[in-house]
């Protein structure tokens, strides 16, 4: 062992003129005969480093080609790769269906080798990033003995010069062996790799013959969808693209049905490369398809239309700044994008200036869209939806319909939705308040305005409203009788009405309203539903005295404007019985009425 190490150390005592050629021993390529390993490149080769080289600081790299054609890059710090380790790693990697390097797969290989390693992309990374020849050359020189009798400055310059020579020799050896290694790779698949790297190459060469044919057809026809199909993520659209491509079914119709978009959107992507559409869209196919599905068929950008794709990307970026959210998540942004696409994006800046006022209404439109999607899905489920009608399909259909509307129409829909939602919330709050006893039943379905327009009557349906109105008029509702009226209103035996001035909105004090027998305050009218003593008015009011006088005498009182006689005798229907005077019984003008007395007479104010 010592003799071998001494021989290695002697190998590195070469003159500087031969140091570059001697660096080639650090790189070795082999054609393996193992069960799963076909070929490999290793740097540094085990047993070629000087004795005192700090191996634990060296990134030892290797590239292997499995028997199924996939290519993998292995990297482990401080562990030069042996043939046995490469064979074990190839057995684990050859069993992978999709050749995408992931952390989980690296853990599986490391568990099999009892080693901490990483899986890298030799086809996608540069030579310096993957092999690190400069670092290897520096570590090799640190393992050599320092010549005696030279200063530190001279030794430092010599080391820098030797490191450059070693790095150049290692780089040349790696390039030479890599060219030989690539001769065993699939040339057609290698030509379609592009920026996808080793993951795309493994995707095209792995699998059965039918799978390889289908994947290569996908790469040839839809190169923009190829990177997402390579990604091994089941919930992502890429898994759907891969499954449809390998199924053998008609690709355009099947994928459009699976992603809930129009087939014309899929056809518009034929021949579109990631460089033409934008590299970011190849990893976000769902967002791209949603945006394209919102456009009209004649406005879709297609193959070799560089200006159309440039305008589309500029419009998407402008919509994201304008609406402060991702355009494919906003119904308003989709509608704006559809409107801006008219004329091949020529009026983009003008359209953006006209629609700048819509950005504050985006949240309301999105709320309307979410509520509509929930309601539509519930309606579909109630009517027995088919198996393929999922919530995602419902939302896609709704988005397509809403995106076809102009922004102004979306604003009108959002306004109507907000008004209806506010009314529903008020009704729900009233119902909840009545159940809890906090809100009273209202005698009027809505406020009434007098014929002259100067007065408005509204129902007081909360204890706070009763007390606030009493304090505004300085009457008994402020303190003394508020508990009494609140209890009567909660039981449904009393209804309190308030009069307001329509000009100022302040409570109005009208003595003319007190001629009704049930008016407890100048601006409040109440109706007893069961007995005349259930809501006894304040004694200081004239209306209260007339009410009690009429009740004690039980004599009919003639109205000034009509011939109807009023009596305070309660009727069985919960109102007041109107009885005609003597000598006129049976006349058609005398009839029974069970409405509020103040609403059945005419006065100067009503």
Image (cartoon, grey):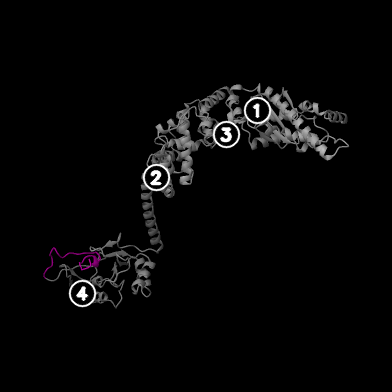
Height in image: 493 above or below 260? below
Q: Secondary structure at mark 2?
A: helix
Alpha carbon distance from label 4 to label 2: 73 Å
**Place of residue 221 in the rendered image (x, y in percent of width and height, measured from the top left):** 50, 26
Residue nearest the observer in this picture, 76 or 58: 58
From the viewer's perspective, is 381 left or right of 571?
right
Q: Quadrant of the N terminus?
A: top right
Q: Give, as a single range, the part of the protein colored magenta.
A: 583-606
Of the residues under marks 1 and 4, which one precedes in the sequence? 1
Of the residues under marks 3 and 4, which one precedes in the sequence? 3
Height in image: 488 above or below 26? below
From the viewer's perspective, is 13 left or right of 540?
right
Q: Inspect this view and state whether residue 381 appears.
A: no
Q: Nearer the viewer, mark 3 or mark 4?
A: 3
* The label number, if any, that marks residue 231 in the structure image: 3
Q: Secondary structure at mark 1?
A: strand
């Amino acid at each position: 062992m010592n003799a071998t190490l001494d021989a290695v150390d002697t190998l590195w005592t070469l003159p500087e003129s031969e140091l570059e050629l001697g660096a080639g021993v650090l790189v070795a390529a082999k054609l393996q005969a193992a069960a799963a390993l076909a070929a490999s490149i290793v740097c540094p080769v085990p047993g070629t480093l000087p004795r005192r080289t700090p191996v634990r600081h060296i990134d030892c790299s290797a590239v292997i080609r499995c028997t199924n054609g996939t290519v993998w890059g292995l990297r482990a710090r401080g562990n030069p790769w042996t043939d046995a380790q490469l064979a074990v790693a190839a057995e684990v990697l050859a069993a992978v269906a999709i050749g995408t390097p992931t952390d989980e797969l690296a853990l599986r290989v490391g568990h099999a080798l009892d080693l901490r390693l990483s899986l890298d992309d030799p086809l996608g990374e540069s030579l310096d990033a993957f092999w690190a020849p400069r670092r290897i050359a520096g570590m090799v020189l640190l393992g050599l003995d320092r010549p005696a009798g030279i200063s530190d400055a001279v030794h430092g310059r010599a080391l820098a010069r030797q490191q450059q020579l070693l790095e150049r020799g290692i780089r040349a050896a790696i390039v030479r062996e890599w060219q030989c290694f690539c001769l065993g790779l699939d040339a057609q698949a290698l030509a379609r790799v592009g920026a996808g790297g080793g993951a795309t190459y493994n995707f095209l060469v792995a699998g059965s013959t039918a799978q390889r044919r289908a994947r290569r057809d996908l790469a040839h026809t839809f190169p923009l969808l190829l990177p997402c199909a390579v990604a091994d993520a089941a919930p992502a659209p890429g898994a759907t693209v891969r499954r449809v491509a390998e199924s053998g079914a008609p690709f355009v119709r099947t994928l459009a049905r699976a992603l809930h978009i129009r087939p014309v959107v899929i056809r518009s992507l034929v021949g579109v490369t990631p460089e033409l559409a934008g590299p970011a869209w190849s990893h976000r196919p769902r967002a791209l398809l949603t945006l394209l599905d919102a456009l009209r068929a004649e406005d879709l950008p297609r193959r070799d239309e560089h200006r159309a794709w440039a305008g589309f990307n500029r419009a998407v970026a402008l919509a994201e700044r304008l609406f402060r959210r991702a355009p494919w998540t906003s119904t308003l942004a989709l509608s704006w994008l559809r409107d801006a696409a008219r004329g091949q994006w020529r009026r983009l800046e003008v359209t953006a200036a006209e629609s700048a006022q819509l950005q504050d209404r985006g949240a309301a439109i999105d709320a309307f869209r979410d509520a509509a999607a929930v309601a539509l899905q519930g309606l579909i489920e109630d009517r027995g939806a088919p198996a393929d009608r999922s919530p995602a399909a419902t939302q896609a259909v709704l988005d397509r319909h809403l995106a076809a509307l102009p922004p102004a129409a979306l604003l009108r829909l959002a306004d109507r939705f907000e008004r209806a939602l506010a009314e529903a919330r008020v009704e729900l709050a009233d119902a909840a308040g009545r159940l809890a006893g906090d809100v009273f039943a209202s005698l009027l379905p809505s406020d009434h305005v007098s014929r002259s327009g100067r007065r408005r009557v509204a129902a007081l349906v909360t204890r706070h409203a009763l007390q606030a109105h009493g304090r505004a008029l300085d009457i008994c509702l402020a303190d003394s009788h508020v508990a009494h009226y609140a209890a009567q209103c909660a039981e449904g035996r009393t209804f309190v009405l308030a009069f307001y001035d329509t000009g100022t909105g302040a409570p109005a004090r009208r003595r003319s309203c007190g001629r009704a027998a049930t008016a407890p305050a100048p601006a409040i009218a109440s109706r007893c539903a069961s007995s005349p003593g259930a809501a006894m008015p304040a004694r200081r009011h004239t209306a209260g005295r007339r009410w009690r006088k009429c009740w004690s005498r039980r004599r009919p009182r003639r109205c000034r404007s009509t011939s109807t006689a009023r009596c305070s005798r309660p009727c069985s229907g919960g109102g007041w019985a109107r009885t005609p005077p003597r000598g006129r019984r049976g006349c058609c003008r005398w009839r029974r009425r069970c409405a509020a007395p103040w609403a059945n007479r005419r006065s100067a104010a009503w």
